[in-house]
Every structure is written in C-alpha cells, then in structure tokens.
C-alpha cells in the first residue's frame, strides 16, 4: 500500500464552520478574503467585485479568530515566523 498523506483542504465553508464552532459566529466570506489578503495569502477577485476597495472589510475584532483558523488549516505556519500585516 502506498504511503498516503491526508491533508484537509481549506475552503471558505470549512473556515466558517470552524469559526462558528469555536467562537459562536459565522464569518462572511468577504471577511475571510480580506483576512487572507492582510496575511499575505493569495486571493482572487470575486466575480461581483466592482473596485479594488473592499465594501465589507474584515472587522478588527474578528480578524484574530479568522487568522487562527488559517493556522488550524495550515495556511499560516507559526513556526516559520510568518507574520500578517497589521489591520489599520
């Protein structure tokens, strides 16, 4: 039998489920996308997005919860010292 590595693939729905289970609210997908951008993770432009400015940026008080979900799903690595940009 071949050595198989099982990795859980991150989806916005899985992040929403994780944050809901751990923190009691469901983050909007636009908050997740904004948090990804703030952490330097790759994002794509949404089909319905008209400008580069985000209409609903990630609230400051929700950012750390979403970022923690990124660590949980392996998008960010604490040991490598990967840092996110500060929310202004």
Image: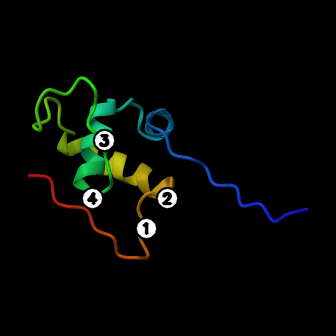
Provide the residue designation for mark 2.
74
- Crowding around mark 3 (Cα neighbors within 10 Å: few <14, some 14 to 19, many 20+) is few
- Disc 1 from disc 3: Cα separation: 21 Å
What label sits on residue 24 in the rendered view? none
Percent position (x, y) of residue 17?
A: 50, 33
Q: Secondary structure at mark 2?
A: loop
Left or right, 12 with respect to 67, comes to: right
- Disc 2 from disc 1: Cα separation: 6 Å
What label sits on residue 40 in the rendered view? 4
Provide the residue designation for mark 1.
77
* Quadrant of the frame with the N terminus: bottom right
Q: Residue at x 10, y 32 (%)?
A: 51
Q: Secondary structure at mark 4?
A: loop
Provide the residue designation for mark 3.
44
Badge 2 vs badge 1, beta-carbon distance below 8 Å: yes
Left or right, 73 with respect to 55, comes to: right
């Amino acid at each position: 039998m071949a050595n198989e590595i099982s990795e859980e693939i991150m989806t916005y729905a899985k992040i929403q489920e994780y944050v809901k289970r751990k923190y009691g609210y469901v983050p909007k997908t636009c908050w997740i996308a904004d948090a990804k951008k703030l952490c330097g993770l790759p994002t794509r432009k949404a089909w319905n997005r008209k400008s580069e400015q985000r209409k609903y940026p990630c609230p400051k008080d929700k950012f750390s919860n979403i970022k923690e979900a990124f660590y949980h799903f392996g998008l960010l690595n604490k040991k490598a010292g990967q840092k996110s940009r500060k929310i202004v």
